[in-house]
Amino acid sequence: MQDKPATPVPVDITLDAGDILITEDPGDSRIIEIYRDEVLDNCERRFIDLIGYYRNGELLAAKILFDNILESLEYLYGDKKVSDTVMLQDFWNEFSDQSIKNSDVNVFDLYNSLYLDENLFSKEEDSNELVIEKTEAQVVRQNNPGFLYVDEKTRQIFANTGKVPSEDFIKSVYENYENYLADRIGIKETYIRSQKYSNFIKAKLKENGLDDIFSYIPAVMTSFYEGTKNGSIWRVENIKEYRGFRNDTGASTALVVRKIKELSKKGNEFNVIATILEEGKYGLSEKDILKDFYTDDFAGFIAMSVILANPADHEFEGVDLDGGDEKKYFASYEDYVKNPFKFTSQQKKTSSSSGSSSKYSKSFIRIMYKVKKGDNLDKIADLFRVSISNLKKWNPKDTSKKYLYPGMTLYIQGDDYQYYKARSGDSIGKITSRYGMKESDFKKINDLNSNTIYKGRKYIVRKK
């Protein structure tokens, strides 16, 4: 009888931060197992979102989410090569939301429809109309948790002003809401920036008897990005009257609050906001105010308000916030209120002599980068033109784990990056050519799984 082979002695595995996070080494399965529950949880949330898109006839969005789920599930098998069918069967067996499993939803039916029905996407000429024609709007609402949520929150906002939103308007809010959330990096950054100014702005609105709803204007106008071209967070008009202080957050807030107070009357808050968004300025008169505020711009504003007013519902709680320098804003605000003319004169003098413009030239955007398969700190640092030491400084908890994993988020201080709002006719090729980027880098930075570019959505690009 042959002797049994000796039991192998366990060997400790140590991975440095710069090591590839996923390779073909079977040892990777030990790392992946640690995050198995997190990966499955993320896939479940995406699947629930996918159901809403599919039922609403937004087939391309549903397909993109399914692609993302399959890619994430691959991480659970390490070096093993398994079919989509096997991965989905395991996923469905472990699916924790029993109410979904007990409904008429089946992961394999959706998979077959999205991947095997060759004629499916030819039907998506107008995704919402496709559903409305087959069913009543009430059915769409009942079968779409996301729509239900937006419907409820929108009606709550309108109730504060005694108005009732139309069905078409709520549908437009929902579409804008989904577009914002599709850019998870951008919307989280907007939330983080909003916290730097939120308490200050809301305190001054309340002090002047104005509704909190006005505090969300900067989120739509500038995403709270302070820069010389923006005119502070409010995007105050670049005219001679305001030029000396338009980039001062405190003083410009005082100006905006005064302008809104002059225009706002009980019941016309929405009309004022819609007009500001449409005209892009605050120097308005009563005759300029729109009578009909049911515009797409205002639908986007309400969608943004729903997101920022409910951070816990969108998993923004616990995010490391900027904090801001509120004392400076309050002081500058009061200085302007006491003597606008004197304040304006002083600002003109100091702006030319003290070199204050250089302060804003250092503005950067906050990038939340989702780690991809094959990433390491060297590659991420090279992608964003930053140092590894800065990556570690910005993300001390994440980078101290000795390794990264797919789907985790790293904060990047994007000094060399800016936002670009897509226009009609844009494509990834055109945008990357304009800003000197590789298409693959553009897709990684913006967390894109396809080559689809959406008009009006903001994408991260390199500064020229």
Image (spheres, grey):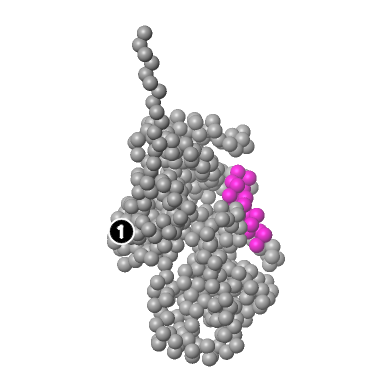
Is residue 152 positioned above or below 260 on the image? Answer: above
Element under label 1?
Answer: loop
The question of residue 156 being in magenta is answered with yes
Disc 1 residue crowd, few under 14, some 14–19, many 20+, Cα 10 Å? some
Quadrant of the frame with the N terminus: top left
Secondary structure mostly seen in magenta is helix
Specify start and end residues of the magenta stretch as a single range.
141-157
Image position, residue 96 (x, y; %): 58, 36
Question: Which quadrant of the view contains residue 421?
Answer: bottom left
Residue in the image at 53% along x and 70% along y: 324
Pointer 1 residue? 437
Q: Nearer the viewer, residue 39 or 428?
A: 39
- Is residue 109 found left or right of 404 in the rendered image? right
Image position, residue 351 (x, y; %): 43, 85
Q: Amino acid at mark 1?
A: Met
- Whether residue 280 is visible here, answered yes or no, is no
Image position, residue 215 (x, y; %): 59, 69
Residue in the image at 67% along x and 59% along y: 156
